[in-house]
Amino acid sequence: MIDQLHYLAQTRPQAPFVLFEDQVLDFATVDDTARRGGAWLVARGIRPGDHVMVAISNRPLFLFCWFSLAACGAVAVPLSHDTFGDPLHYMATQSESRLVLTESSEESRIAETLAGTGVEVQGFDGEEAFLRQVAVFAPLQAHQPRPDEPLAILYTSGTTGLPKGVVIPVESYRAAGRAIVDAIGVGGEDRILTFLPLHHANPQMYSLMSCLTVGCSMALVPRFSASRFLDQVRKYEATGFTYVGTVLSILAKEVTQDSPSSLRFCVGGGAPRAVWQEVAPRLGVQVHELYGMTETGGLVTINTREKYRFGSVGAIREDFEVVVLDDGDNVLASGVGEIAVRPRQAHIMTAGYFKKPEETLKASSNLWFHTGDLGRFDEDGFLYFEGRKKELIRRAGEMISPITIELVALKHDAVVDCAAVGVPDPIMEEEIKLVVVPRHDIAPAALAAFLAQALPKHMLPRYIEFATLIPKTPTQKVQRFKLVQSAGVIHDLKAKA
């Protein structure tokens, strides 16, 4: 990735790369900053292969740190800048990170959480502070990585425990960028509006890597805002954007009539058919719905310009094999089964879960990576997503492990047992409901306040329901499907707010 940036800095030095508020950063500026930043990291003792967390919001500072790590050969471990408490402590220590790069406003909080771990924390008061820090260092000769070298470890929640660190090789990022560019026809003059959190695979692989593949621009905004969306499109003359299903659902409610603009495409996953149908003509875009996950290098199927089928998640990427399997891991010629994938080329999907060899082996049994999702193919080879076998809660594009929420809730003296489940929601895809077996009376608001001390906002339950027991199998596995429908009084914390 750093080599692509350096190539663009030489061939398109003054072409706009990052547009943020009133700033325009060209490729030469970002490349120079990255190589000076890499030299600064080396001076701090960071070496190729070291792990460094990046806990920064959507701003150029994230990209400065990201590219600086790539320049010196370190592995980025990005996470939400507002992660704190148990999840932050776990990910920092499990990833064996040596350093956390963050914003000054978060530095003391993160340092307090990581006290005694040996993980250093460095905060920056914005982009200018970073530039001043690295300005005294001569640009280093950027590290030239092998295709199989890890570029990042992205944490994604599992169904049976705490989050897993997905090790993503350099070539996986490069291949994802090529796949998006080829499928959509992204060119050097495009501008991709990027509002999804940069610590996610979606904006990294679909937006950032498209920019690095063809030399186009990223119009970066702090967060998604439906009310400001069209103004941002006009301000930056954006031609495309990436999405998760929640984004299009919200835009379908906000944009109620055709809105001519510079937009021509959007790309992502999780768009319901009805929303897809509504949004496309209103925004004047072609919706490139795809299927994939962090482990598979972002995407394995996509609706391309040439192969397009409304309602599907597209045709198979040329460098992947995709099948649906029955419960015995036999390939199904028709019908619904578990989606399984494997690469046709080396290093284009995950190298495994960091320090979790058993889970890596389990996910890749019988020579297929098992996604835990259900799907089917039509007679023309288009894949259709049919739901999830996994127990993950998908809230606003975030994949959330119920186990993480439950482990925090069980620390409360009043909680005997509990289980978190996703319940359908027309806007958020799913909302989180926490079913609690109480030891004694406790106000829902008090329990919510307790959870808020240890969980990031996107993990906080909207609903709390009290019950006399949690339904389980004879082997003590929670029967979550029985908890989706309410059996008792349910407390809507949002309604009471």
Image (cartoon, rainbow, N blue to C red):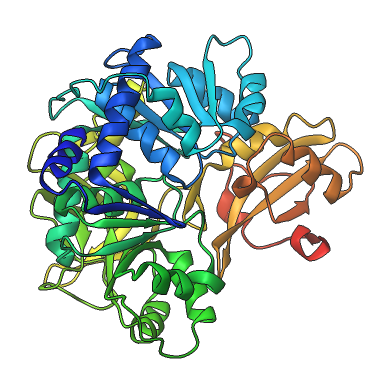
Q: Is residue 330 visible?
A: no
Nearer the observer, 134 or 317? 134
What is the count of numbered marks? 0
Q: Between residue 361 and residue 482, name the one nearer to us.
A: 361
Q: Nearer the viewer, residue 148 or 60?
A: 60
x 27%, y 19%: residue: 138
Rendered residue at 75%/53% (across/down): 464
Toward the bottom, the furthest residue is 257
Residue 394 seen in the figure: yes
Position of the C terminus, as image quadrant, is bottom right
Q: Position of residue 454 (x, y in %)?
A: 69, 34
- In the displayed structure, 375 sits above or below 174; it is below
Q: Quadrant of residue 409?
A: top right
- Residue 449 at x, y = what percent? 80, 43
Q: Quick check: 281 left or right of 400?
A: left
Residue 157 x/y as whole percent: 47, 39
Which image quadrant: the N terminus? top left
* Vertical comparison of 306 with 218: above or below: below
Instruction: Determine the residue positioned at 23% across, 20% down.
Output: 140
At horizontal 45% and vertical 30% (from top left) the residue drawn is 130
